[in-house]
Image (cartoon, coloured by chain):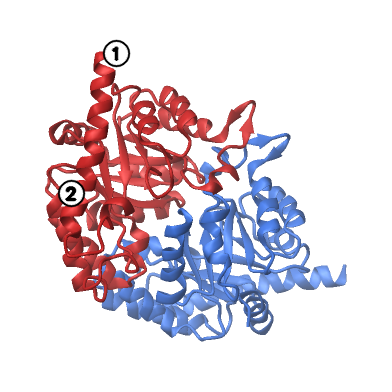
Chain colours: A red, B blue
Amino acid sequence: MTALKKLTTSIEQRKSYLCVGLDLDQRKIPNGYRDSIKNMCKFALRIVDATKDIVAAYKPNLAFYEALGPDGLFLLRQIISRIPEDIPVIIDGKRGDIGNTAQFYAKACYDIYRADWVTLNPYMGYDSIRPFLEVKDKGVFILCLTSNPGARDFQRMEINNKPIYLHVANKVEYWNKDNNCGLVVGATHPEQLESVRRAAASMPILIPGVGAQGGDLEAAIVNGTDSFRKPALINVSRSVLYASEGEDFDQAARQAVEKINNQITGLQNQHANA
Amino acid sequence: MTALKKLTTSIEQRKSYLCVGLDLDQRKIPNGYRDSIKNMCKFALRIVDATKDIVAAYKPNLAFYEALGPDGLFLLRQIISRIPEDIPVIIDGKRGDIGNTAQFYAKACYDIYRADWVTLNPYMGYDSIRPFLEVKDKGVFILCLTSNPGARDFQRMEINNKPIYLHVANKVEYWNKDNNCGLVVGATHPEQLESVRRAAASMPILIPGVGAQGGDLEAAIVNGTDSFRKPALINVSRSVLYASEGEDFDQAARQAVEKINNQITGLQNQHANA
């Protein structure tokens, strides 16, 4: 099964557009689970177990695991092995390097961590992306317009009245010969998300920035999916993982997911009836 | 000592502008050293031992270690611990993520791998760089114009007759309040290197692309240092690490370094006499 098919199937079967970012931050994990890698693992496995039937995908960001040293990567593998086979795993590393080196990043993401999708940075151009694209049953989400304030520094600069992020969207659409590309667009740019959606044909869009970063859920899902006609994932991390500071953190995480799922279903019904 | 002072001191004391890229590729390591991490470690330690008095810096690229799984990161730490304290270690990961996440990458690079410098990708803008800049005694080399063919896809696009890579150089110069920024410019763009050198004031430039990628050494060092007046590093990886397929690989690596050092010293003498 291709990565795209696995993704759209998971969205349909679990009736969820949510991707849970598994970003383990020791400062935020409930007391009793943050003091050792073993306990952080217990925390993460309980989050996965409590949400795996109602989310479309999981996205561990490599930074949080690398900061724990080599043992953090054993932790990551253990967490990934708990995720059911039919749920896409997105390895969020935002990698980008020359072709020869990118091959090694592809190996790390696909072979060591069994990623279905990876996130990549476009700055170094096609040959930095190609080694990933050549693994045709896997997918890549390429940074287009990111959710953070720094998106203004370069991504929104304009060339011939067209911002760089749209040049990126157009190039990625051109690279998408095997239907294994997607784009990352922050929910903090709702209007721009609409224009990327138009440029992106039927590529999936990964949308971070709802929640802690302040993006609006309705604009994100409606614009990101072109009113529920195209695939998109809304990423949530902190608001789900750290929904409770107590022993009930897993059930609180589940409730946080259910709440957003219900909001999205409500919007979907509105659009179906419109 | 600041990262910049450590770098310029190392260049002076070892009379070398070379940075050796410690990119361990099992397909290229001599027979007998490629079949296990333990043997790869022996190979790398012998390369370090044979060159440490005649090179200015070492630059392990994280991709090659990540592709070996968690054990690859133990290997990396072992190799780094063999590098003398007064030689700068550049962790080449080309990271870039939102501020909250970038903090964790900074922790990984500086605390887990005792990097003096890191390479970063500018696409996500200032808040993705800031957590690194805040560690004031460490330095960052930010991708400006990379050595690979894909540099054409976005970096050389022009905004108001100024290519994006020069916008990056200007912004980085502006961010360089604490003298801890540098730029990465490929030797495959000798003329553009000259214009970046002008935009970069006294920032150090890290120059890959000499050797396997075809960049010209003379243009790289003369343009990169503004005729030996500013700091720069010429990175070499494959041509040094894999200079011999035999048991003499370490001495062959040393000879390859000496040859380039001598070429650069010759050019330096020419410029001193000109």
Using the image, determine if residue B163 lies above or below residue B89. above
Q: Say which quarter of the image contains residue A140.
A: top left
Q: Residue at x 44, y 59 (%)?
A: B100
Where is residue B41 drawn, in percent x and y?
33, 78
Identify the residue at horizontal 41%, vertical 65% (top origin): B104
The circle drawn on residue A254 is 2
Q: What's the CA distance linking mark 1 and mark 2?
A: 30 Å
Circle 2 chain:
A
Quadrant location, the C terminus of chain A? top left
Q: Is residue B258 visible?
A: yes
Instruction: From the top left corner, tell me how far across and down residue A142 is, in percent.
Output: 41, 41
Tell me the residue at 55%/81% (across/down): B87
Q: Nearer the viewer, residue A74 or B197?
A: A74
Residue B57 image offset from top left, x and y in percent: 56, 75
Q: Amino acid at mark 1?
A: Ala
Depth check: B121 or B16 in front? B121
Question: Which residue, given by chain and number where applicable, does mark 1 sit on?
Answer: A274
Q: Please rate how many residues cluster around mark 2, counting C-alpha atoms within 10 Å: few if below 14, some from 14 to 19, many from 20.
A: many
The kind of residue tagged 2 is Arg
**Looking at the image, is A241 positioned above or below residue A137?**
below
- Mark 1 or mark 2, earlier in chain: 2
Q: Chain of mark 1?
A: A
Identified at 26% across, 37% down, the residue is A136
Report the front residue among B25 and B175: B175
| A128 horizontally vs B73: left or right | right
The answer to whether marks 1 and 2 sit on the same chain is: yes
